[in-house]
């Protein structure tokens, strides 16, 4: 059976490789960049995940509805909260366009 690739939860414009129930791989080719969609990860305090072999995210504390993360990454890899990343990106774009 030839099914279309499943891309729910993945941003538009990225290559996604998925597997259907028959273990046949499908690809949706939009841009050169690839992301691998991974479902939700469950971690307990003091457990971690490793990203790309050189970035480690550790759950350092869980208090009420808040989770504290520790991030270990090479110095050349910027690590920001999402809202800081968005502001930096906006500021850089505005600067490049001469808007201030």
Image (spheres, helix red, strand yellow):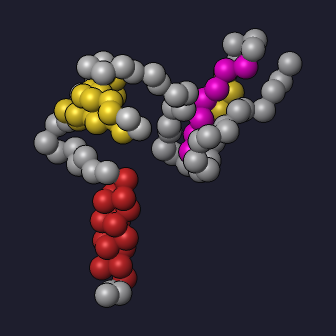
Place residue 24 in its image quadrant: top right
View extreme (left): residue = 75
Check the image and report above or below for 3 versus 94. above
Image check: 72 left or right of 45?
Answer: left
Judging depth in this view, the residue of 24 and 41 nearest the camera is 41
Residue at (48%, 44%) from the top-left corner? 33
Q: Answer whether residue 16 is magenta in the image.
A: yes
Check the image and report above or below for 16 versus 96. above
Image check: 21 left or right of 16?
Answer: right
Residue 56 shows in the view: no
Residue 60 shows in the view: yes
Q: Position of residue 38 (x, y in %)?
A: 52, 28
Judging depth in this view, the residue of 43 and 96 nearest the camera is 43
Q: Answer whether residue 71 is magenta in the image.
A: no
Q: The C terminus lies in which quarter of the figure?
A: bottom left
Residue at (30%, 79%) from the top-left corner? 95
Image check: 76 left or right of 87?
Answer: left
Q: The N terminus lies in which quarter of the figure?
A: top right
Query: For the magenta stretch, what is the residue range?
Result: 14-20
View extreme (top): residue = 22
Place residue 90 in its image quadrant: bottom left
Judging depth in this view, the residue of 61 and 30 nearest the camera is 61
Q: Position of residue 5 (x, y in %)?
A: 72, 32
Judging depth in this view, the residue of 64 and 34 nearest the camera is 64
Place residue 18 in its image quadrant: top right
View extreme (right): residue = 1
Q: Position of residue 41 (x, y in %)?
A: 47, 24
Q: Position of residue 93 (x, y in %)?
A: 36, 73
């Amino acid at each position: 059976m030839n099914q279309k690739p499943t891309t729910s939860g993945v941003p538009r414009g990225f290559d996604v490789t998925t597997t259907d129930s028959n273990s046949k791989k499908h690809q949706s080719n939009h841009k050169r960049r690839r992301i691998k969609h991974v479902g939700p990860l469950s971690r307990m305090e003091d457990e971690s995940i490793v990203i790309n072999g050189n970035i480690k995210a550790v759950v350092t504390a869980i208090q009420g509805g808040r989770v504290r993360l520790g991030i270990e990454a090479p110095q050349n890899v910027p690590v920001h909260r999402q809202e800081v990343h968005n502001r930096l990106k906006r500021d850089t774009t505005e600067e490049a366009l001469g808007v201030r």
